[in-house]
Image (spheres, grey):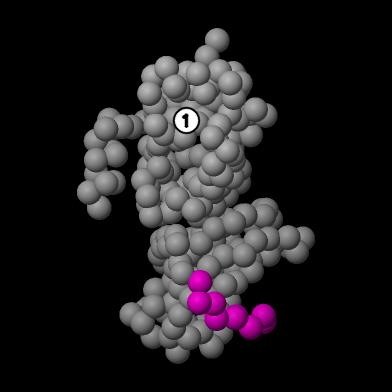
């Protein structure tokens, strides 16, 4: 899991993570480069938090926004990928 | 015809969609990146394989690439559009193969079924995160804001 944030600061993210004991890496996407690559944000008709699940081959398997209809929940998708 | 160079590179992403002679979509030149895998019954029979570019903006359009004298193995090829721009792709020709196949090349895109857009970034711990290096793992990207 990788957290991607574009609205705060590195210091804010460090504090946020330390307060919550989060272990996965955070990226401060200062210029919203990754946000734009993944078409996340109000400009793209969705509002974070947005989750994008990528499988072992690098293929997008799930997006949590309603831009594309999904049948399974995120948890089910992750479980099925980990079992492959 | 450019001769294909055999590469020892491991095929990290292999996508294969066979399509038998449908109506060809209109040609819209655009650069792209991607990986494809070709399956054919007989390597000697591989003579005419078209690479179709599945582009986010323009949809499917043909970018024919004729493979000659193909041998089993992993090949790197460069597919260019009419303007000469394009991108390299990796083709893996396997032993069990079939002829007259059309290969669909999948491009990057932030949509289900596409290759996740590649990025390299530095985490807040100064750890370099390269999505491509995470192939082989399931990756969940969590985009969040705070106000």
Check the image and name the residue furthest to the top.
B147
Q: Is residue B3 highlighted in magenta?
A: yes
Judge whether B65 appears above or below B96 on screen: above
Counting every numbered tag in the picture gives: 1
Q: Which residue occupies 58% across, 29% down? A: A28
Q: Quadrant of the N terminus of chain B?
A: bottom right
Q: Main secondary structure of the magenta part?
A: loop
Q: Return the chain for callout 1.
A: A
The residue furthest right is: B83
Circle 1 sits in a helix, a strand or a loop, which is it? strand
Magenta-drawn stretch contains A37: no
In this picture, is B69 found above or below B48? below
Q: Residue at x 56, y 84 (%)?
A: B68
User: Which residue is at a point 54% across and 77% down the rendered structure image?
Assistant: B7
When the figure is inspected, residue B77 is found, relative to residue B127, above or below; the finding is: below
Q: Position of residue B18 (x, y in %)?
A: 40, 64
Where is residue B69? Give x, y as percent: 53, 88
Task: Return the residue at label 1.
Answer: A3
Residue at point 58%, 77% (across, down): B66
Q: Position of residue B143 (x, y in %)?
A: 49, 27
Q: Is residue B19 visible?
A: no
Judge from the rendering whether residue B99 lies leftward or rightward of residue B77; answer left or right: left
Residue B65 position within the rendered picture, expressed as x and y whole percent measured from the top left: 59, 72
Kindly tell me whether residue A53 is visible in this rendering: yes
Quarter of the image with the C terminus of chain B in it:
top right
- Neighbour tally class for label 1: few under 14, some 14-19, many 20 plus, Cα within 10 Å: many
Query: What segment carries the magenta color?
Result: B1-9
Pick whichever, B102 or A77, lies toward us. A77
Quarter residue A19 falls in: top left
- State the residue in front, B31 or B138: B138
Relative vertical location of residue B146 with respect to residue B57 in this rendering, above or below: above
* Picture quadrant of residue A61: top left
């Amino acid at each position: 899991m990788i957290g991607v944030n574009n609205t705060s600061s590195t210091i804010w993210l460090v504090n946020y993570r330390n307060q919550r004991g989060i272990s996965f890496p955070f990226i401060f996407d200062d210029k919203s480069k990754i946000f734009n690559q993944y078409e996340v944000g109000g400009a793209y008709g969705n509002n974070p938090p947005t989750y994008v699940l990528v499988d072992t081959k690098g293929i997008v398997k799930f997006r949590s926004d309603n831009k594309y209809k999904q049948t399974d929940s995120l948890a089910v998708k992750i479980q099925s990928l980990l079992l492959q | 015809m450019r001769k294909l160079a055999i590469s020892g590179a491991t095929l990290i992403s292999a996508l294969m969609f066979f399509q038998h002679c449908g109506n060809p979509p209109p040609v819209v030149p655009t650069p792209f990146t991607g990986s494809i895998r070709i399956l054919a019954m007989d390597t000697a029979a591989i003579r005419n394989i078209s690479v179709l570019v599945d582009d986010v903006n323009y949809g499917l359009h043909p970018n024919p690439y004729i493979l000659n004298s193909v041998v089993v193995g992993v090949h790197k090829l460069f597919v260019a559009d009419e303007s000469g721009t394009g991108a390299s792709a990796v083709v893996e020709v396997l032993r069990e193969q079939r002829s007259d196949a059309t290969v669909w090349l999948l491009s990057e895109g932030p949509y289900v079924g596409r290759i996740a857009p590649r990025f390299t970034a530095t985490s807040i711990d100064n750890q370099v995160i390269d999505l491509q290096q995470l192939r082989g793992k399931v990756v969940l990207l969590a985009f969040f804001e705070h106000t």
